[in-house]
Image (spheres, helix red, strand yellow):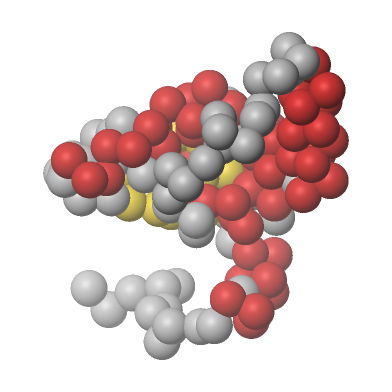
Protein backbone atom coordinates (compact mmCIF):
# COMPACT_ATOMS: atom_id res chain seq x y z
CA UNK A 1 0.00 0.00 0.00
CA UNK A 2 3.09 2.25 0.01
CA UNK A 3 2.25 3.61 3.47
CA UNK A 4 4.85 5.95 4.89
CA UNK A 5 3.35 6.29 8.37
CA UNK A 6 3.45 2.61 9.37
CA UNK A 7 6.44 0.53 10.30
CA UNK A 8 6.79 -3.01 11.54
CA UNK A 9 9.52 -3.71 14.06
CA UNK A 10 11.19 -6.94 15.00
CA UNK A 11 10.12 -8.31 18.40
CA UNK A 12 11.44 -6.24 21.31
CA UNK A 13 12.28 -7.64 24.76
CA UNK A 14 9.80 -6.65 27.48
CA UNK A 15 12.34 -4.50 29.31
CA UNK A 16 12.75 -2.36 26.16
CA UNK A 17 9.04 -1.75 25.50
CA UNK A 18 8.40 1.32 27.72
CA UNK A 19 9.44 3.93 25.12
CA UNK A 20 7.04 2.39 22.61
CA UNK A 21 4.10 2.73 25.01
CA UNK A 22 5.01 6.39 25.40
CA UNK A 23 4.44 7.10 21.70
CA UNK A 24 1.47 4.78 21.18
CA UNK A 25 -2.14 5.92 21.10
CA UNK A 26 -3.31 2.52 22.31
CA UNK A 27 -2.31 -1.10 22.60
CA UNK A 28 -3.67 -4.11 20.79
CA UNK A 29 -4.12 -7.63 22.12
CA UNK A 30 -5.78 -10.48 20.30
CA UNK A 31 -6.72 -14.05 21.01
CA UNK A 32 -7.89 -16.60 18.50
CA UNK A 33 -11.20 -18.37 19.00
CA UNK A 34 -10.08 -21.34 21.07
CA UNK A 35 -11.74 -22.83 24.11
CA UNK A 36 -8.48 -22.48 26.04
CA UNK A 37 -8.50 -18.70 25.41
CA UNK A 38 -11.95 -18.12 26.91
CA UNK A 39 -10.43 -17.86 30.41
CA UNK A 40 -7.21 -16.13 29.38
CA UNK A 41 -6.02 -12.67 30.36
CA UNK A 42 -3.13 -11.89 28.01
CA UNK A 43 -0.25 -10.42 29.98
CA UNK A 44 0.40 -7.86 27.24
CA UNK A 45 -2.64 -5.76 28.26
CA UNK A 46 -1.31 -4.93 31.74
CA UNK A 47 1.80 -2.95 30.73
CA UNK A 48 -0.33 -1.07 28.19
CA UNK A 49 -2.78 -0.09 30.94
CA UNK A 50 0.04 0.66 33.37
CA UNK A 51 1.34 3.10 30.75
CA UNK A 52 -2.01 4.88 30.69
CA UNK A 53 -2.99 3.66 27.26
CA UNK A 54 -6.27 2.19 26.08
CA UNK A 55 -6.43 -1.39 24.84
CA UNK A 56 -8.21 -2.74 21.82
CA UNK A 57 -8.89 -6.36 22.65
CA UNK A 58 -9.81 -8.73 19.86
CA UNK A 59 -11.35 -11.77 21.46
CA UNK A 60 -14.02 -13.04 23.78
CA UNK A 61 -14.38 -14.57 27.21
CA UNK A 62 -12.69 -13.51 30.45
CA UNK A 63 -10.43 -10.83 29.00
CA UNK A 64 -13.29 -9.22 27.08
CA UNK A 65 -15.27 -9.01 30.34
CA UNK A 66 -12.29 -7.43 32.15
CA UNK A 67 -11.76 -4.84 29.40
CA UNK A 68 -15.44 -3.92 29.42
CA UNK A 69 -15.81 -3.88 33.22
CA UNK A 70 -12.71 -1.72 33.68
CA UNK A 71 -13.83 0.66 30.91
CA UNK A 72 -10.21 0.66 29.81
CA UNK A 73 -10.54 -0.31 26.20
CA UNK A 74 -12.65 -1.57 23.37
CA UNK A 75 -13.58 -5.18 22.67
CA UNK A 76 -13.85 -6.33 19.08
CA UNK A 77 -15.11 -9.81 18.26
CA UNK A 78 -12.58 -12.05 16.53
CA UNK A 79 -12.52 -12.27 12.76
CA UNK A 80 -14.19 -8.90 12.18
CA UNK A 81 -11.57 -6.74 10.42
CA UNK A 82 -14.09 -4.09 9.33
CA UNK A 83 -15.18 -3.45 12.93
CA UNK A 84 -11.55 -3.45 14.08
CA UNK A 85 -10.69 -0.78 11.52
CA UNK A 86 -13.74 1.26 12.52
CA UNK A 87 -12.77 1.12 16.22
CA UNK A 88 -9.16 2.11 15.50
CA UNK A 89 -10.38 5.13 13.56
CA UNK A 90 -12.84 5.99 16.35
CA UNK A 91 -10.00 6.11 18.87
CA UNK A 92 -7.87 8.23 16.53
CA UNK A 93 -10.77 10.63 15.93
CA UNK A 94 -11.72 10.85 19.61
CA UNK A 95 -8.53 11.55 21.57
CA UNK A 96 -10.58 12.43 24.65
CA UNK A 97 -12.17 8.97 24.66
CA UNK A 98 -8.79 7.34 24.08
CA UNK A 99 -7.26 9.30 26.98
CA UNK A 100 -10.17 8.42 29.31
CA UNK A 101 -9.89 4.71 28.49
CA UNK A 102 -6.15 4.92 29.17
CA UNK A 103 -6.71 6.65 32.53
CA UNK A 104 -9.27 4.00 33.45
CA UNK A 105 -6.76 1.28 32.56
CA UNK A 106 -4.02 2.86 34.66
CA UNK A 107 -6.38 3.16 37.65
CA UNK A 108 -7.61 -0.42 37.15
CA UNK A 109 -4.08 -1.81 37.19
CA UNK A 110 -3.08 0.24 40.22
CA UNK A 111 -6.17 -0.83 42.18
CA UNK A 112 -6.18 -4.50 41.19
CA UNK A 113 -2.70 -5.58 40.14
CA UNK A 114 -0.29 -3.44 42.14
CA UNK A 115 1.72 -5.88 44.25
CA UNK A 116 1.22 -3.95 47.52
CA UNK A 117 -2.56 -3.87 46.93
CA UNK A 118 -2.62 -7.59 46.15
CA UNK A 119 -0.84 -8.36 49.43
CA UNK A 120 -3.01 -5.92 51.42
CA UNK A 121 -6.19 -7.52 50.01
CA UNK A 122 -4.85 -11.00 50.71
CA UNK A 123 -4.05 -10.08 54.32
CA UNK A 124 -7.45 -8.43 54.79
CA UNK A 125 -9.19 -11.55 53.50
CA UNK A 126 -7.02 -13.76 55.67
CA UNK A 127 -7.91 -11.74 58.79
CA UNK A 128 -11.62 -11.83 57.90
CA UNK A 129 -11.68 -15.59 57.39
CA UNK A 130 -13.53 -17.53 60.07
CA UNK A 131 -11.30 -18.98 62.74
CA UNK A 132 -10.12 -22.45 61.79
CA UNK A 133 -10.92 -21.94 58.10
CA UNK A 134 -7.31 -22.58 57.19
CA UNK A 135 -5.89 -25.68 58.79
CA UNK A 136 -3.08 -27.90 57.59
CA UNK A 137 -5.63 -30.43 56.37
CA UNK A 138 -7.66 -27.81 54.46
CA UNK A 139 -4.62 -26.67 52.52
CA UNK A 140 -2.89 -30.00 52.17
CA UNK A 141 -1.35 -31.39 49.02
CA UNK A 142 -3.86 -30.15 46.45
CA UNK A 143 -1.10 -29.28 44.04
Taking the view exactly as shown, the residue that stands out farthest to the bottom is 10
Nearest the viewer among 98 and 94 is: 98
Residue found at x 65% / y 30%: 135
**Front one among 27 and 43:** 43
- Whether residue 13 is visible to the viewer of this picture, yes or no, is yes
What residue is shown at x 59% (from left), y 61% (from top)?
Answer: 24
Residue lying farthest to the front in this orientation: 137
Residue at x 49% of width, y 33% of height:
67
Q: Position of residue 29 (x, y in %)?
A: 40, 53
**Position of residue 78 in the picture relative to residue 45 (left or right):** left
Could one spot residue 121 in this view of the protein? no
Nearer to me, 69 or 122: 122
48 vs 5: above or below: above
Q: Is residue 26 above or below residue 94?
A: below
Residue 39: image location, x then y, percent: 34, 38
Q: Residue furthest top?
A: 130
Question: Would residue 138 appear left or right of 33 to someone viewing this image?
Answer: right
In percent of width and height, residue 122 lies at: 75, 34
Left or right of 38 on screen, residue 113:
right
Q: Residue at x 52, y 51 (%)?
A: 45
Q: How many marks?
A: 0
Task: Report x, y in % for residue 51.
Answer: 70, 55
Image quadrant assignment for residue 65: top left
Measured along the vertical axis of the image, is residue 44 above or below residue 131? Answer: below
Which quadrant of the view contains residue 101?
top right
The front one of 6 and 141 is: 141
Give the quadrant of the N terminus.
Answer: bottom left
Amino acid sequence: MDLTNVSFKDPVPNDELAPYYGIADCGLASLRILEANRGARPSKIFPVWASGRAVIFIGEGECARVVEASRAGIVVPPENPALLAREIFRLLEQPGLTAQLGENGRRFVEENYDWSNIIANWLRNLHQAPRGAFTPSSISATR
